[in-house]
Amino acid sequence: MPLSPVLTRRWAEPQSWTLATYERTDGYRALRKALAMQPDEVTAIVKESALRGRGGAGFGAGQKWGFIPQGDDKAHYVVVNADEGEPGTCRDAPLMMVDPHALIEGTIISAYAVGCHQAFIYLRGELVHAGRRLDNALREAYAAGYLGKNILDSGYDLDIIVHRGAGAYICGEETALLDSLEGYRGQPRLKPPFPATHGLYACPTVVNNVGTLASVPFILLGGADWWKQMGPEKSPGTSIFSLSGRVVNPGQYEAPMGTTLRELLELAGGIRNGHQLKFWTPGGSSTPLFTAEHLDVPLDFDSVLAAGSMNGTSALMIFDDADCVVHAVGKWCEFYAHESCGKCTPCREGTFWYVQIYERLERGDASAEDIETLLDLSDNILGRSFCALGDGAVSPVVSSIEHFRDEYVEHYERGGCPFRAERLVRAS
């Protein structure tokens, strides 16, 4: 499977983050094309391309833009969700560091399409270097006339502000992000109403992921039909797959949607010598686990869902036969318990008790009843939380018990983790 450099086409360019490099490689040509069109025509092209949100939900970008009411007397906003915090996910950060102007151009085009004159990039606070690159790129864009008043003599005005978050995973949820952006504690809102009509400051708002908006300039230049040539019909285009864990060459690999893990492993040099694939996440820690049996599942939104998981953020964490699934899931549960905002009882209490049970399994004083308690807890969390954090915490727990119940049993029958010695050797 060949790599498909679309979003990553500039990554190997010298000083790829600068305006000079960006303009030399077709930068801001798509903006000029968009400004010569009517806003609804821009939305129509993105809708026709079937671009789906790269933040995990996979909702149609053009469809989301089309929900913004036109002709009203309210301000319209575009908010970029750059609060990348899913364990195993690392594609927005390098994209913003290496090619920040692609995100800025995509944001300007989307803002023009929905009648927005004030946009925000909500950046994860720990991404300091990416933030500096964005700040510098925005200064360049303003100086060149791509932002501010009367952009490229079109009569269209737009300002973009980078807002740094404080490292709360919950703010990756779009309504919690909006609350945080307004200066409140980041907690998810009850929906409906949805951000399309009642978003930032109770005004119509589009919230899109970094990868989604960075794809827009390429779609405007190449056309919807060109974009749909890559990947399956219902999930076209490319994706940046983040491979981490027990692979020879971990990193970011851009390939068409629908590429399989078997093909990606070939690109990444395979599993480390002497070991075999045991389990993996197709879309970050909040997605149900896959095993070696799923090596040939096409990694697109619909195929992964049909196979029992979610494509999510295309974050593939790879574990081999020396890794303990119980230990890995327990660590993820600690993350979700720590990051739960505490607003709703099922998530707040359920993730707390997950941690207690996994600690008992690790110590060796658990029992068969604890496995059933984990499943019962999961039933009470799933679908009962304000946002997807609760459901995300459930996914690795239930799927790991489904695929590796024997390993859970071994923990309480043998009095602790059978992989503990291997972990200690690795740590040393």
Image (cartoon, grey):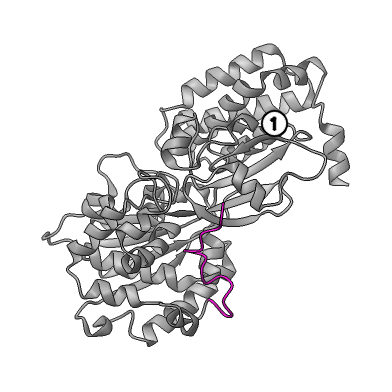
Q: In this view, does 281 lie to the left or right of 216?
A: right
- In the displayed structure image, the side of residue 362 where residue 240 appears, left or right: left
Res 141 → quadrant:
bottom left
Residue 428 appears in the figure: yes
Q: Residue 112's image quarter?
A: bottom left
* Residue in the picture at 56% in, 70% down: 11
Q: What stretch is highlighted in magenta?
A: 1-16
Where 234 sits versus 164, above or below?
above
Identity, as a three-letter code, of the amino acid under mark 1: Val
Residue ranking furthest to the top? 369
- Circle 1 packing at 10 Å, graded few (<14), some (14-19), many (20+), is many
The residue under the point 30% across, 80% down is: 148
Q: Position of residue 147 (x, y in %)?
A: 33, 79
Q: Position of residue 241 (x, y in %)?
A: 55, 51
Q: Dot 1 lies on which element?
A: helix
Residue behind mark 1:
325
* Magenta run includes residue 220: no
Give the dominant element type of the magenta stretch: helix, strand or loop. Answer: loop
**Depth order, front residue of 26/228:** 228
